[in-house]
Image (cartoon, helix red, strand yellow):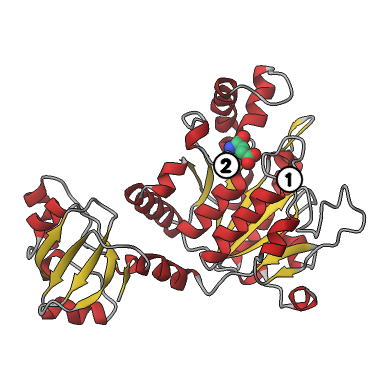
């Protein structure tokens, strides 16, 4: 364990793409929205962007804000009431971020997702494309679960895991959970005075898993267990994850200055993790390409319909297919952006003809290079 504690700690100032999860308890206090704290966070976000870091905020607080407005009692709410509270609170939550970031010249966008948006491949590719476009336009996406439509069976329920899923979806290299504890401990520090905090966890072993109790704080959903699940998702996606105490002023600044925290190190980088993920999928069909397309793929290009000579199998949008050479040799695998039927219709045709053939404008590439492994 000593070796784990001494491993190098990632630097948040070096993040290329950073997802920050903000728990309800940080944002909403006894007096309502904690605007002073939020202002500090906005300063942190502006500073990170000034360093060239792209930032996505995953924020809880919709239910906590909404229940105050509606005067709902403390404690767990029945599902319908928490959905109603989320509907009332989310609009205020998004507004609060907009007002905090606008003085820095930062545009915000609201993105509400459900578990299905990350599990269903077609919707996963859609959320990925939307977030990518927002980031490309310089927007800071404010993400939350779409609590008003998500029922218990189909919801994340906690934003720790949602944030990890978002981090992996966009290929973030760092995820920061701002929490009411300053890291991951050998036991629950509130119950066991002998508990000690890890600085760095290089690998999530069964021993580490056994240390995550079930601590749940007052108004937040996630305990250490959900944080560890989030860490597993993040690190497998090549994203490093930190847990730190978020209630201090300018928590990102504090972390950069050496505040107590636990880092879970990512396995490799996000791009490599995504390729591993695609490589492990079972193809649902085959797409045969000509020699020109093969050369383009080898040069790192996307697969355009023009280079496709044959399409076999039944697949939907976002599903994995095998890519074969003209001679039928396996070249690689990729997530296809059209259904098998559509792919047959546009095979061999120019991207500019897609609208005329299908009746609607589609994406130019049949398989984007980011969704392909050779
Ligand atoms: N999505 C919920 C909200 O905004 C919070 C879930 C959580 O606390 O993790 O109120």
- In terms of sequence position, does the residue under pointer 1 or pointer 2 come before the other? 2
Residue depicted at x 66% and y 21%: 69
| Camera-side residue of 23 and 191 | 191
Residue depicted at x 35% and y 53%: 125
User: SS at mark 2?
Assistant: helix
Question: Which residue, given by chain and number where applicable, does mark 1 sit on?
Answer: 214
Image height check: is 266 above or below 62? Answer: below
Residue at the far right in the pictured view = 193
Image height check: is 228 above or below 238? Answer: above
The C terminus - image quarter: bottom left
- Quarter of the view holding residue 159: top right
Where residue 303 appears, x then y in whole percent? Answer: 21, 69
- Give the side of residue 35 with respect to residue 265, left or right: right
Spatial CA span between label 1 and label 2:
34 Å
Question: Which residue, given by chain and number where applicable, does mark 2 sit on?
Answer: 98
The N terminus - image quarter: bottom right
C-beta proximity under 8 Å, tags 1 and 2: no
- Asked if ligand 1 lies within 8 A of label 1, the reply is no
Residue depicted at x 73% and y 49%: 179
- Quarter of the view holding residue 222: top right
Where residue 280 appears, x then y in whole percent? Answer: 37, 67
Image height check: is 213 above or below 233? Answer: above
Where residue 138 appears, x then y in whole percent? Answer: 47, 57
| Camera-side residue of 43 and 223 | 223
| Camera-side residue of 119 and 128 | 119
Residue depicted at x 56% and y 32%: 90
- Quarter of the view holding residue 291: bottom left
User: SS at mark 1?
Assistant: loop
Q: Is residue 79 visible?
A: yes
Image height check: is 347 above or below 156? Answer: below
Q: Is residue 42 visible?
A: no
Query: In which quadrant of this rendering is ligand 1 seen?
Result: top right
């Amino acid at each position: 364990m000593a070796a784990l504690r001494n491993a190098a700690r990632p630097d948040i100032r070096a993040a290329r793409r950073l997802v920050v999860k903000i728990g309800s308890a940080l944002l909403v206090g006894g007096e309502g929205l904690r605007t002073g704290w939020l202002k500090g966070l906005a300063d942190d976000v502006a500073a990170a962007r000034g360093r060239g870091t792209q930032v996505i905020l995953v924020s809880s607080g919709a239910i906590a804000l909404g229940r105050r407005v509606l005067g709902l009692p403390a404690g767990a709410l029945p599902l319908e009431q928490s959905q109603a509270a989320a509907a009332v609170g989310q609009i205020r939550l998004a507004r609060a971020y907009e007002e905090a970031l606008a003085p820095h010249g930062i545009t915000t966008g609201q993105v509400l997702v459900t578990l299905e948006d990350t599990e269903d491949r077609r919707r996963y590719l859609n959320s990925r494309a939307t977030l990518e476009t927002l980031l490309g336009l310089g927007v800071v996406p404010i993400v939350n679960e779409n609590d008003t439509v998500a029922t218990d069976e189909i919801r994340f329920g906690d934003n720790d895991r949602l944030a990890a899923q978002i981090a992996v979806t966009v290929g973030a290299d760092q995820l920061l959970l701002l929490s009411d504890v300053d890291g991951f401990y050998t036991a629950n520090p509130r119950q066991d005075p002998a508990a000690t905090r890890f600085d760095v966890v290089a690998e999530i072993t069964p021993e580490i898993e056994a240390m995550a109790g079930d601590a749940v704080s007052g108004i937040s959903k996630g305990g250490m267990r959900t944080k560890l699940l989030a860490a597993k998702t993040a690190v497998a996606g090549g994203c490093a994850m930190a847990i730190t105490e978020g209630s201090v002023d300018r928590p990102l600044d504090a972390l950069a200055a050496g505040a107590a925290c636990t880092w879970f190190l990512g396995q490799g980088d996000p791009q490599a993790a995504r390729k591993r993920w695609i490589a492990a999928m079972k193809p649902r069909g085959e797409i045969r390409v000509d020699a020109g397309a093969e050369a383009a793929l080898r040069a790192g290009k996307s697969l355009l319909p023009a280079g496709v000579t044959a399409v076999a199998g039944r697949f939907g949008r976002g599903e994995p297919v095998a890519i074969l050479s003209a001679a039928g040799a396996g070249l690689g695998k990729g997530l296809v952006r059209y259904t098998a039927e559509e792919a047959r219709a546009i095979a061999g045709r120019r991207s500019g003809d897609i609208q005329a053939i299908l009746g609607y404008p589609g994406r130019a590439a049949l398989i984007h290079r980011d969704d392909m492994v050779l």
